[in-house]
């Protein structure tokens, strides 16, 4: 069902945490494949991806170009974009399945774990760190990631639009490496 796309660059340690969190999704049949779109790492990122059975490619393209290329290669009907080092909370599988079953056709983000004075405000603002999920058809409709060097991941969220974004209850955290 889902093709998970993770853009990396010298991310071997962070990648291990994210891939470990995806294993229950793979055994539940939710994660079909993981594509690691690498930015010419010099560490062991490729070996980590290989050991985990990921599709791996390395390119000197800017981030947006790598993400767009990975989305083109994806076989799943849904895309999930995660950053290395992010770990979905324990209920991410149930939340994701419930969202897909609603059939709204929009996109979803996990909640961010925020602490401090302005936490409640920042938690409501969509941000690429939140693990974007969307149907491949919507990704194509909005033109996907922009491949140029000036690309900002937040641009993709703007083109999706707040009205088509759902924030799931599951919190996405960053691993402490």
Image (tube, rainbow, N blue to C red):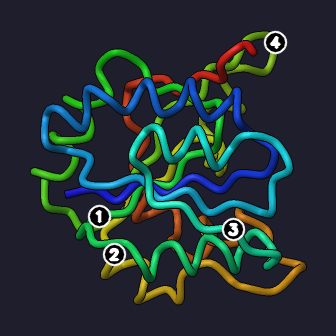
Q: Where is residue 128 drawn, in percent x and y? A: 65, 51
Q: Which residue carries the number 1 mark? A: 78
Q: Are marks 1 and 2 in contact (CB under 8 Å)?
A: yes
Query: Is residue 133 shown above or below 176?
Result: below
Element on which disc 3 rests: strand
Q: Where is residue 78 drawn, in percent x and y? A: 29, 64
Q: CA distance from mark 4 to mark 1?
A: 35 Å
User: Which is nearer the eye, 153 or 30?
Assistant: 30
Query: Is residue 126 shown above or below 40?
Result: above
Residue at 65% x, 56% y is 7
- The disc, 4 or 3, on the residue closer to the chain's N-terminal end is 3
Element on which disc 1 rests: strand
Q: Nearer the viewer, mark 3 or mark 1?
A: 3
Q: Which residue carries the number 4 mark? A: 117
Q: Which residue carries the number 3 mark? A: 58
Query: Is residue 33 shown above or below 44?
Result: below
- Total marks shown come to 4
Q: Are marks 3 and 2 in contact (CB under 8 Å)?
A: no
Q: How many residues crowd mark 3 within 10 Å: few (<14), some (14–19), many (20+)?
A: some
- The disc, 4 or 1, on the residue closer to the chain's N-terminal end is 1
Q: CA distance from mark 3 to mark 2?
A: 22 Å
Residue at 25% x, 34% y is 25
Q: Which residue carries the number 2 mark? A: 136
In the figure, is residue 161 to the left or right of 169? Answer: right
Q: CA distance from mark 4 to mark 2?
A: 37 Å
Tell me which corner region of the image, top left, top right, bottom left or bottom right, holds residue 122. Answer: top right
Q: Nearer the viewer, mark 4 or mark 1?
A: 1
């Amino acid at each position: 069902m889902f093709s998970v796309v993770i853009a990396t660059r010298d991310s071997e340690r962070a990648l291990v945490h994210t891939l470990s969190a995806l294993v229950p999704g793979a055994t539940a049949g939710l994660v079909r494949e993981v594509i690691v779109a690498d930015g010419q790492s010099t560490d062991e990122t490729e070996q980590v991806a290989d050991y985990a059975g990921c599709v791996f490619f390395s390119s000197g393209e800017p981030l947006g170009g790598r993400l767009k290329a990975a989305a083109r290669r994806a076989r799943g009907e849904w895309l999930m974009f995660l950053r290395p080092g992010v770990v979905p909370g324990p209920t991410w599988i149930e939340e994701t399945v419930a969202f897909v079953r609603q059939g709204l056709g929009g996109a979803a983000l996990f909640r961010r774990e925020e602490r401090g004075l302005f936490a409640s405000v920042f938690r409501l603002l969509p941000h690429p760190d939140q693990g974007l999920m969307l149907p491949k058809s919507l990704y194509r409709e909005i033109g996907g990631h922009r491949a140029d060097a000036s690309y900002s991941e937040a641009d993709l969220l703007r083109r999706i639009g707040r009205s088509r974004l759902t924030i799931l209850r599951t919190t996405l955290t960053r691993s402490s490496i």
